[in-house]
Amino acid sequence: MAPPPKSVIILGGGTAGWMTANLLQHRWGKSGTRVTLIESPDIGIIGVGEGSTPQLKVFFDDLGISEAEWMPRCNATFKAGIEFVGWSDRPGYERYFHPFPTDLDPFTQRSFFYATRARRTGRDVPAHPDPFYIATCIAREGRAPIAPPNFPFFVSYGYHFDAHLIGAFLRDFGTARGIEHVEARIASIDVGSDGDVAALVSDDGRRFEADFFVDASGFRAAIIEGALNEPHRSFAENLFNDRAVVTPTESLAGAQACTRSTAMSAGWAWQIPLTNRTGNGYVYSSRYIDDDAAAAELRAHLRLPEDAPVRRLAMKCGRIARSWVRNCLAVGLAQGFVEPLEATALHVVLATVKGFLEGWEKDDRDGFNRAIAARYEGIRDYLVCHYRTALRKDTDYWRDAGAMTALSESLKRIITAWFTGADLEREVLEQGIAGIYPPQSWHCMLAGYGNFPESAVLKPPGPDVTPIDMAEIERFVAGCAMNFPFHAEALKRLSEAR
Ligand SMILES: Cc1cc2nc3c(=O)[nH]c(=O)nc-3n(C[C@H](O)[C@H](O)[C@H](O)COP(=O)(O)OP(=O)(O)OC[C@H]3O[C@@H](n4cnc5c(N)ncnc54)[C@H](O)[C@@H]3O)c2cc1C
């Protein structure tokens, strides 16, 4: 097993930089590795990125940080999944919920998968995903996905949080445990004759040397692209969105434990509930709408005055060819970015650091780089599938997205399996991509948008179709959900426990 490096410098104090610094300190600090994080307050952080997947809970658990400790400090709320609103024109499919998994899903999911296949092959059976999932019911009823102590099933969940506050929390936590924090603007990077990064040099002439470097410098990708010239692979061919316009509104935190994603004329708008405010943003394609029109559309969507201030952001969608190059690992926006529809960026940061540490121990840089590239492509495919199968057709943006032909072989096989009535679960498992998005996620999306034959051509289920007792399923799901606290109550208990 390779010994840890003696010193690591992380360039960048955004969420990605501080998460990585804490993980490296946690793993290598006890072996004597000196971990330093350098950031420039003048440049600042991107300051968006306020929704997570369940992986963030694993991160805090691994560091031994309780929810009562971090959530109130970051104005955080619980997240049971994502609700997609207005993405499909099909009657009955105007909204659907992408739930995070629970150990209760196997009780109802088999029926859901069966129903979708029967409907795909022309039988008139109910196959909308929502009634089958407990996480969906929890969020719709305004509850939190926090299983009571005596509840014997695991329920996974993510969070919403303030991007600035989570960075500050992780900075305080990490510096108290030995991470050195330096404020400096890096002006140049020295690459040695062997091709390794030798030092970062600040604009006031300070020189920072280390054995290993982490590039967490955001879209600038100052080390990995700027100094090591690693190529960037764009996803623009099939992910159209390249801009965002952002504005907060007042809090609705007690009301919902989910992110809401509402389709707009040239993209979609997120709504993220924090305890003190609601985060909103419109992610759009500059090919289909200009910045002012996008800002006006977001204000109208939020019922804000025409002059309400908004923040504008450019997004670079794609990934660096290799994330670990020589003595440098890229994480966060420096490493890659797929648009935030499924809030996966911090999830990838965690997978990257975990995979890197394993790769370091096994001295397997190539295996790590292949796995991370496959993860990006897998997430990209899932997002592309949203646009390709959403069934909204009212603008050029949605018509072009629905007609998109630039699909990976993997995604073509998924879509073919669905529309030919084949076993989609088997397809996902055989492709080995269930660790990126499980069969549940693919079924929920494709069924949630109503990708079935037109109602007029569906036939009543014959004796060859096993009847599904929807009343029984709904009773079961609602009965389980009743055990969960209301979201506002769960948040109150958390701040009282602090
Ligand atoms: C519109 C939008 C919505 C998003 N929504 C989500 C979401 O819901 N969920 C999610 O997981 N992710 C989301 N993301 C992604 C998320 O914002 C980022 O992954 C996350 O904030 C981490 O960013 P970062 O740390 O890589 O970069 P940044 O926050 O940009 O930090 C870069 C750091 O590098 C420093 N730096 C750069 N150059 C230098 C230099 N020369 N010298 C010194 N310091 C330097 C900066 O000062 C800063 O500290 C979203 C992104 C966008 C654009």
Image (tube, rainbow, N blue to C red):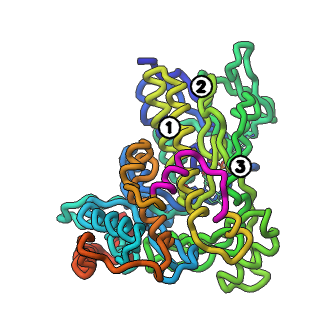
Task: Give the residue displayed 63% in from the left and 23% down from the top.
Answer: 326
Q: Which residue is mark 3?
A: 41
Determine whether label 1 and label 2 are within 8 Å by CB.
Answer: no
Magenta stretch in the rendered image: 402-417
Query: Which residue is denoted by mark 1 in the rendering?
Result: 353
Q: Could you classify mark 1 by the number of other residues whose Cα lies within 10 Å: few (under 14), some (14-19), or many (20 or more)?
A: some
Q: Quadrant of the N terminus?
A: top left
Is residue 413 highlighted in magenta? yes
Task: Please indicate, yes or no, whether residue 114 appears anywhere in the rendered image.
Answer: yes
Mark 2 CB lies closer than 8 A to ligand 1: no
Check residue 212 in the rendering and tell me which mark sits there, or answer none. Answer: 2
- The image shows residue 38 at horizontal and vertical percentages of 65, 38
Mark closer to the chain start, 1 or 3: 3
Side (left or right) of 299 relative to 422: right
Residue 471's quadrant in the figure?
bottom left
As measured in the structure, the alpha-carbon distance from the residue carrying label 1 to the one carrying label 2 is 14 Å
Q: Nearer the viewer, mark 1 or mark 2?
A: 1
Q: Is mark 3 within 8 Å of ligand 1?
A: yes
Label 1: which secondary element: helix
Q: Quadrant of the C terminus?
A: bottom left
Q: Amino acid at mark 2?
A: Phe
Label 3: few (<14), some (14–19) or many (≥20) C-alpha neighbours in 10 Å: few
Q: Along the line of sight, which residue is nearer the eye, 34 or 258? A: 258
Secondary structure mostly taken by the magenta-highlighted segment of the chain: helix
Q: Nearer the viewer, mark 1 or mark 3?
A: 1
